[in-house]
Amino acid sequence: MIEIRDIYKKFGEKEVLKGISTVFETGITNLVIGRSGSGKTVLVKSVSGLEKVTSGEIFYDGRQLSSMNEMQTTALKREIGMVFQGGALFDSMTVAENVRFPLLMFSKLSAAEMDKRVDFCLERVDLPKTHSLYASELSGGMRKRVAIARAIVANPKYLFCDEPNSGLDPQTSILIDKLIKEITEELNITTIINTHDMNSVLEIGEHIVFINNGQLWWEGTRHDVISCDNKELNDFLFNNEITKRADL
Amino acid sequence: MKKIVDAVGSYFILLGRVLRKPDNGKAFRRQLFFEMRVLGIESLPIACIISAFVGAAVVIQLAASLSNPIYPTWITGYTSRKAIMLEFAPTMIGLVLAGKVGSRIASELGTMRITEQIDALDIMGVNSANYLIMPKIVAFMLFSPIIVILSVFSALAGGWIFGVISGVITSYEYLDGLQLEFATYDMVYGITKGIVYNFIIASVSSFRGYTVTGGALEVGQASTRAVVESCIVLIVSNLALTSILI
């Protein structure tokens, strides 16, 4: 479980996050949604520790991030997996080397055990025969799946996904969403997904946090979204040509 | 002025993160050998080619300037050797490598930064600055003596070949001058300069690449700044080193 309390983030004079508090529960898919520039990426990066918050507190299963020393922070980071928007795969490494990398750096597994774990993770994301390919040889969806495999290879407790569907076709997006949801339930981890994909909201949004202008504007589940009367949320989710034509 | 102070401060803060014990010794050694090949071995051909032609130009210039019966015949070889070992080989090749290696390092790290590969390392708990930059600095510094020695050899050989072919000096006069009062310290001096220059090139370029924000345009700008700033710091440190070492 990750709890955030009253977090603010400023870049110079610009206040991007304005006092956000919420709880991201374990074992469910937590979605952070909002328009481009609303502050959702900054929120996810702040919670993951990639950005330092200006004020406020973040608790990882009761452990306060701001009171941790460098060693504790490093240890916590080893419990985190992250899927970046573009995959962020290391260009100079093959798929297998990318997935093996976190194990190589920190685990005490033997080479054979590492290979076994890499095979398992690549099979889990349905990429069993891609070990020797380089990132440049992969499609967008494959890159995302390799990134998911790399994020889960070291058995993380917390999984962050930054717009995992961006640039993917609708079918592949659904596959990626389902994969993340299944992994979250299987490993019983705390997953936070930053997205502006409406399909994701309706497919896997077990806990949705809507960020508008740096503030937490609305919170609920995918079932609540349909019946919600929050104007900004409805404008964000349903105010497009397709939904208008479908008269939703 | 504030920007310069900020940049210098950030450079030393980054160096503080770089100069730490690696997270994993095996991974460090693997990166080190990779960087030795990329930054060291791949720099040798250009260092040798440029040194040979610069050496030739130095010998021809000196021979022409010193073609006076009052000077001893060995003077061209002797002065060429001194000039090449003390200044041309380390400094000139340092400037050339600031362009080749500096732009490579800055663009590589800059691209890694904008494609979030550095963030990926950080989120895994890897000290990304140490993992990415330390092997570059160490590999390039370790290769410095080889680069300087080969550069000196190429320059002296180039001077010999082109000097004799162009007829400005005889083989005997040149070789006689080269061997006259050879001081080992001159080689140590050149290598010391080379090591310092290579540290400057690798660290300044890494700083510029590692701290890029934005996109492809900014990576290009960082690459240019890396080369320009490396050259300036290198030239300034050349003056300081010359004053200290001579």
Image: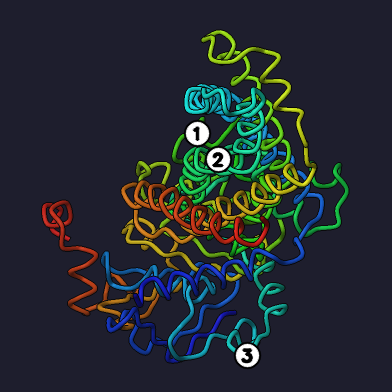
User: Which is more toward the observer, B142 or A242?
Assistant: B142
- The residue sitting at 49% across, 85% down in the picture is A4
Percent x, y of residue B127: 65, 64
The local crowd at label 2, few if under 14, some if 14 to 19, many if 20 or more residues have their Cα within 10 Å, is: few
Element class at badge 1: helix
Determine which residue is flagged by label 1: A136
Sequence-first tag of 2 and 1: 2
Element class at badge 2: loop
- The residue sitting at 42% across, 66% down in the picture is A205
Residue B87 visible in the picture: yes
Dot 2 amino acid type:
Asp
Q: Are marks 2 and 1 in contact (CB under 8 Å)?
A: yes
Q: Chain of mark 2?
A: A
- The residue sitting at 49% across, 60% down in the picture is A161
Sequence-first tag of 3 and 2: 3
Percent x, y of residue A54: 43, 87
Dot 1 amino acid type:
Ser
Image quarter where the N terminus of chain A lies is bottom right
The vertical placement of B12 against A203, above or below, is below
| Residue A67: mark | 3
Q: CA distance from mark 1 to mark 3?
A: 40 Å
In which quadrant of the rendered view does residue A203 lie?
Answer: bottom left
Element class at badge 3: helix
User: Which is more toward the observer, B46 or B16?
Assistant: B46
Determine which residue is flagged by label 2: A91
Q: CA distance from mark 3 to mark 2?
A: 35 Å
Q: CA distance from mark 2 to mark 1?
A: 7 Å
